[in-house]
Image (cartoon, rainbow, N blue to C red):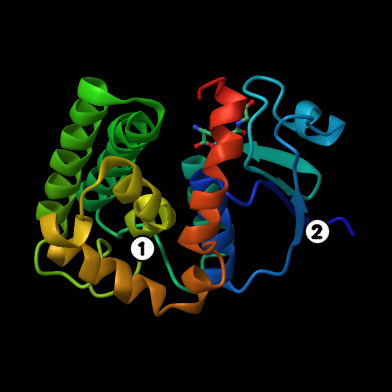
Amino acid sequence: MADEVILLGFWASPFGMRPKVALAEKGVAYEYREENVRDKSPLLLNSNPIHKTIPVLIHKQKPICESLNIVEYIDEVWKGKSPLMPQAPYERARARFWADFIDKKVIEYGIGIWTNKGEAQEEAKNGFIECLKLLEEELGEKPYFGGDTFGFLDVAFIPLSCWFYTYETCGNFSIEKECRKLMGWVKRCMEKESVSMTLPDPHKAYEFLGTLKKWRGIE
Ligand code: GS8
C-alpha cells in the first residue's frame, strides 16, 4: 500500500515510544517492526544511514528520522485529531526548547544514575532531580505541559517515566518525594490509553538493565 505507515522501534527506548504515543493520539493505523538494536535490519540501516538509530517512521516509503522530528511530522500530516504542537509560535518554541532539554540533560543524567557508582552517581542523581524540578516549574499548575490538553512536550517527556523506577532503585531516592506535582502529571498521562498502552511496565525496564549494562560493558 502506497500510503502505508511503518514504525521501526525498540520496546525499551523512550525515543521509540514517542512516535507510538503520537500515532495512538492521532488514531493512525501502522505496522510496528521491532528492531534488534544489536543487529539492525537492512531497512533500518538504509532508512537512517546517518545515525542508524530507532525510531524511524516510514510514510509512503519515505523515512523520517529523529524522534522529536517524527512527532512533529505526525502532528503536521494528521492535523485533524488531537493537535500536539501549540498554536502560538512562542509556545511552540518553548515546547521545542524543553524537549531538547530533556534529550540533552534529563536523559543523560538518567543514564548516569545506572552507569555510575559513588560520587559520579550522586552527581547524576542530583543533576537529574534538578532537571525534574525545572520541568515541574514549567508545568506549573497546568494539567499537561500542553495546557489543558496533552501535547508535544507531554509526548516527548512521558516515555521517560517508565524508567523512573530504575533510576530510583539504582540511585536510592524517591521522585514522588522530590517532585510530587510532576508525579501527579505522570499519573494523569497514564490515564490516557495512548500512553498506558505504549509504555512498558517499569519493572520490565528494570529487569532489562542487566542486558543494557552488558551492552555497555559495565559490571
Ligand atoms: C536518539 C535515538 C536513539 O538513541 C532520537 O531519535 O531522538 N536523538 C535520537 N536510539 C537508540 C534507541 S535504543 O536506546 C538506538 O537506536 N540505539 C542504537 C545505537 O545507537 O546503535
Find out if the beta carbon at label 1 lies less than 8 Å from the nearest ligand 1 atom.
no
Q: What amino acid type should be assigned to the residue bearing mark 1?
A: Gly
User: Which numbered dot is residue 3?
Assistant: 2
Can you tell which of label 2 and label 1 is closer to the viewer?
A: 1
Q: Position of residue 19 (x, y in %)?
A: 56, 54
Of pointers 2 and 1, the one earlier in the residue sequence? 2
Q: Ligand 1 falls in which quarter? A: top right
Q: Is residue 188 left or right of residue 78?
A: left
Q: Position of residue 122 (x, y in %)?
A: 20, 30
Quadrant housing residue 23: bottom right
Distance from the alpha carbon under mark 2 to that under mark 1: 25 Å
Residue with the mark numbered 1: 151
Q: Position of residue 185 (x, y in %)?
A: 25, 68
Question: As displayed, is residue 34 above or below residue 20?
Answer: above
Q: Is residue 128 left or right of residue 74?
A: left
Q: Position of residue 30 (x, y in %)?
A: 74, 63
Q: What amino acid type should be assigned to the residue bearing mark 2?
A: Asp
Determine crowd level at label 2: few under 14, some 14-19, many 20+ residues with C-alpha closer than 10 A.
few
